[in-house]
Image (cartoon, rainbow, N blue to C red):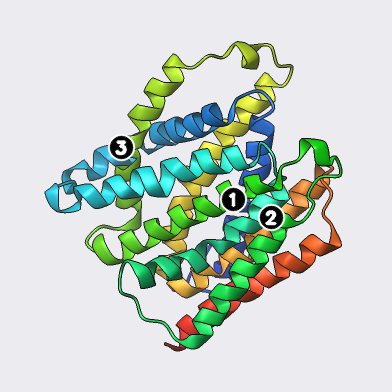
Amino acid sequence: MRVDLEKRSWQWILLIFLAFIWGTSFILMKKSLQSFTNLQVGGMRIFFSFVFFIPLIYRHIKKLDRSNLMSLLIVGFVGNAMPAFLFATAQTEVSSSIAGILNSLTPIFTLIIGILIYSNRVGWMSVIGLILGMIGAFGLIMSVNNLDLETSNNWYGIFAVIATICYGINVNEIKFRLKDLDGVAIASLGFLFIGPVAGVYLALSDYSMATASPYIISSMLSVVGLAFFSSFVAVILMNILIKYTTTLFAASVTYIIPVFAVFWGLMDGERFLILQVFWALVILAGVYIVNRKNVKS
């Protein structure tokens, strides 16, 4: 069977596979946190991704210069490092299902930041979408995501929301200030700066709790898988998808990611309440309106 990405059917297959990878990342973070701290999980995700990117860094290093240095630092630290730590921190208290749904706020914050910082103009329908998305996020954070209320802190969902703000900054920085670099070069050069920093942190970290955990092997495999699939393979696939389709079609992965995140959460015994389904639909409705308006403009 020959893969032909000129055909719409193969484009949909790639889109769903990409959503599967990113949707699975939240349950992988949850499993990683069984043995490692949130900072260790974030640090290992960054460092292992950096190791995978080394061949591509070597290939694109000549494209690094003064004109793109600051933007690549923003991509590395704001677009990759901070979300890795923020999502890992959020999932110390909220379920992987909730984290996956909150991740769908990324297009909304991309639009907000584009308006506030990059002078991007939008219509009133986009504003409605923004408001809907924010209402949905607030409602989801306030909803109960764990039957044991004494061990659950829904406000940790704010860390996931902040991570999507970081993603929004990242997308706008790439769109408006790194037009001369392709996506693979941007991703690899971004990890050039954050990988060594993460490596130093990991070298100085205390692993006494991790070594005493009965889940250390599965946790290590989970964080390696998180780095390889969610931070390395997914970036390459996303750029392939954009090359053969459009940024709009690729962005629709946002709607599918929560499906896989919730699926894996339910398979792992998480409870997902009817009220949370409602707030999740409010978020997705807001994202849909924002993207639909962007199609027409």
Q: Residue 141's mark?
A: 2
Identity of the amino acid at label 3? Leu
Residue at the spot of label 1: 158
What residue is shown at x 58% (from left), y 56% (from top)? 103
Reply above or below: 23 against 275.
Answer: above
Residue at the spot of label 3: 192
Q: Nearer the viewer, residue 35 or 17?
A: 35
User: Helix, strand, or loop for circle 1?
Assistant: helix
Q: CA distance from mark 2 to mark 3?
A: 34 Å
At label 3, counting other C-alpha atoms closer than 10 Å, the crowd grade (few under 14, some 14-19, many 20 or more) is many
Q: Are marks 1 and 3 in contact (CB under 8 Å)?
A: no
Q: Nearer the viewer, residue 179 or 9?
A: 179
Q: Nearer the viewer, mark 2 or mark 3?
A: 2
- Residue 243: percent from the left, percent from the top? 39, 67
Reply above or below: 120 against 150.
Answer: below
Which sits earlier in the primary sequence, circle 2 or circle 3? 2
What residue is shown at x 82% (from left), y 54% (from top)? 272
Q: Which of the 4 quarters of the picture holds residue 57?
A: top left
Asked if residue 247 lies left or right of residue 153, the reply is: left
Asked if residue 206 lies left or right of residue 56, the reply is: right
